[in-house]
Image (cartoon, helix red, strand yellow):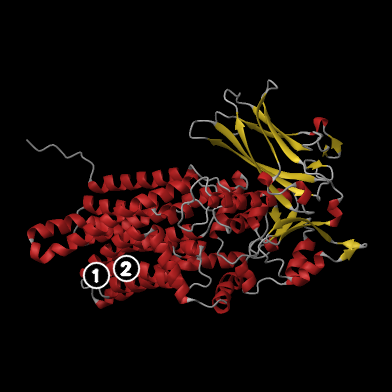
Amino acid sequence: MPAAPDTRPSADRVGRIALCLLVLAGAALALTHLGGLRWDSDEGINVSKAWLLADGFGLYREVWADQPPGYTWLLGQVFRVLGPSLEAARGLTVLASLPGAIGVAIGARTLLAERGAGPGRAWAGGLFGALALLLAPNHWWASRAAMIGLPAFAWAALALGLALGYGRSGNPLRLSAAALALGLSLWFKLQMLYLGLPLGLLVIWRRGFAADEAMRARLPRLARDLALLGLGSLGPLALSALAYGPQRFVQQVLGTYLDTRSNYAVDLGANLALLGAWLASDNLGLLLLALTGALLLLRRPSAGALLALAWPILATLTALQHAPLWIKDHFEPLLFGLALLAGLAVGELPTRIRARRERPTRAGWPAWLVLAGLLAWLAWLPRVLVVDASLAQARSYRNDGRVVPPGSEEAAAEQRRDDELRAAARFLAVYSRPDDFVVTDYQLVAFLAGRRLAPEMAAFSSRAVGVGAFRDADLIEATEARQAPVVLMWDAEIAAFEAYVDMLQEPIDGRPRFSPIIDLGNQRQGWVRASRLAEAPADLADFEGVARLLGYAMDRVTGPDGSQALDLRLFWHSQGRSAEQLSVFTQLYGPDGERYGQHDGTPAEGGQPTTEWPVRALIIDRHRIEIAAGAPDDLRLHLGLYSPDSGVRVPLRLAGRRIEGDALVLPDRIDPHGDRR
């Protein structure tokens, strides 16, 4: 009888399914935490440009930009459908970064197959490389940030994986796909342009030195494949230049890059120190395992092996030449090369162990080397997982490789910095209308406030200022052309334009054009157009003669014993010192009228009494309110100012109307048994 056909799925099919499940699991995990106040200051630039693009403003024409249009264009389409939000932008980054893990997996799998590994072992190595990439803290952070870099590097990694397949098979379709993936990478960001050189050399090796083809057959195929590589990789950029205007596109994208190179000096020593810190903080285990993979490739070099080694070498050299160098951005490409080499090392381990058994005197050391690298990665894995877990719970991230423990002084300082951002966003929202354009050198604040930037200022940054892309006249024209009602000086970049600051203070009808009305600390100033000051914001609580409540933030806190508390921060905009020292009262009431929590005290936990409040200052005032056991799940917070000596409350007005009881009721409803609604 004929043997029954084997219906078991092939190792290749199982490997592809496992890769899809791994990538989807990584994406699903990232999509669960798209909130948080900020993951990077440049998020503001990216979302602001995309919002303006979605509103019909022309990129490189009304909206100055120093990057290719890919990410901005895609995000603009997302905003048209879903509306502008950080969550939507971060979700796009998650999805656009998925090709990176796929590229690492198929790249490692191809190299292992080239070296004689069976499909099962080849896919095991590829899957390990993808997993190592997804677990790397820098990737975990960047895959959820509204940033251009990681999507660009991810598509370049896919190009590398596909190109390795072309090098092994010579299939021009794989080369076309690799070229298109590289083209999409460059459509996002130009940083991976250097990958074109090793890909071109791979084509020359594959077609120019093919032993099984005559010279007459080699040359046409070599020319065809080089043309496919050039058209696919440069086509999206060329089409973008034609669509947006070649002169403006080249001037803003390529011109800014060249000007940056000439205006910023490279500090190689400092860059090397940053590289060492980046590798030692979160990536030491991955580095050691990748080095074992690199040594294995060098023992049996091939065109594919050299291409795989070229990625981390070129990524490192390119990053070290950056000025200024940002540790959390410019070293990201190196992760993909390290992960691919790590996957190759793990996939080679069974072969090396078998070889050691068969030839212990000749082949013993590679097995021990790979095993040592794997043990180093496993030893470093707990730290990586701790950092990843902290990022999964974080509300903002500075990416310095440290885990800030809750309740520590560092955590309190981080919270204060975040609350300063919230207060600044509230300031912009209070003194402008939804259809207004505002001006600031920290675009994320404007986006958090739900306000569009003057289009000319969307990409305003220290880099753009450093290369001379902005002048006083540009700032003045943008402010007046859009009749911006509010100017927020945050990073001292706008304040450095002296003629612009003089313009703000120019008298019109005997009074300055703009008035500085709030001091946010650290030389941060908020200015409001004089013609808008007469319009009293309807939702700004005014405690007569003392302060206005600009905004607030609150978090529910669960104690070790299960007790519940409310961590409340009030953002007071002081109008001057009070004659007597006042206290703040905060009270939690249920629907039954009963009080279930209260905290009274001098502002800022006694550190900033109202008798010392300067005019126009921002006062961040924290209160910890213990919630009584058995409290209902629908609490409301009442607050105000009063004299502890007489018990008399400071009069409260909203939109000029006196509020009965002189207590402000916040709109948020607090559920002590669940999340705040």
* Viewer can see residue 588: yes
First of labels 2, 1 by sequence position: 1
Q: Out of 58 and 15, give the one closest to the viewer.
A: 15
Q: Is residue 212 above or below residue 174?
A: below
Q: Out of 114 and 144, give the one closest to the viewer.
A: 144
Q: Are marks 2 and 1 in contact (CB under 8 Å)?
A: yes
x, y percent for residue 95: 47, 49
What residue appears at the point 69 percent right and 53 percent down from the top-left corner?
A: 452
Q: Which residue is mark 1?
A: 298
Q: What is the residue that sits farthest to the right in this orientation? A: 509
What residue appears at the point 20 percent right and 38 percent down from the top-left corner?
A: 7
Which image quarter holds the C terminus?
A: top right
Which image quarter holds the N terminus?
A: top left
x, y percent for residue 52: 66, 55
Q: Which residue is mark 2?
A: 309
**Which three-letter amino acid code belongs to the residue tagged 1?**
Leu
628 sits left or right of 277 in the view: right
Q: Is residue 244 above or below residue 436?
A: below
Q: What is the residue that sits farthest to the front in this orientation? A: 645
Element carrying mark 2:
helix
Q: Residues within 10 Å of mark 1 (few under 14, many from 20)?
A: few
Based on the displayed image, in which of its 4 quarters is residue 468 positioned?
bottom right
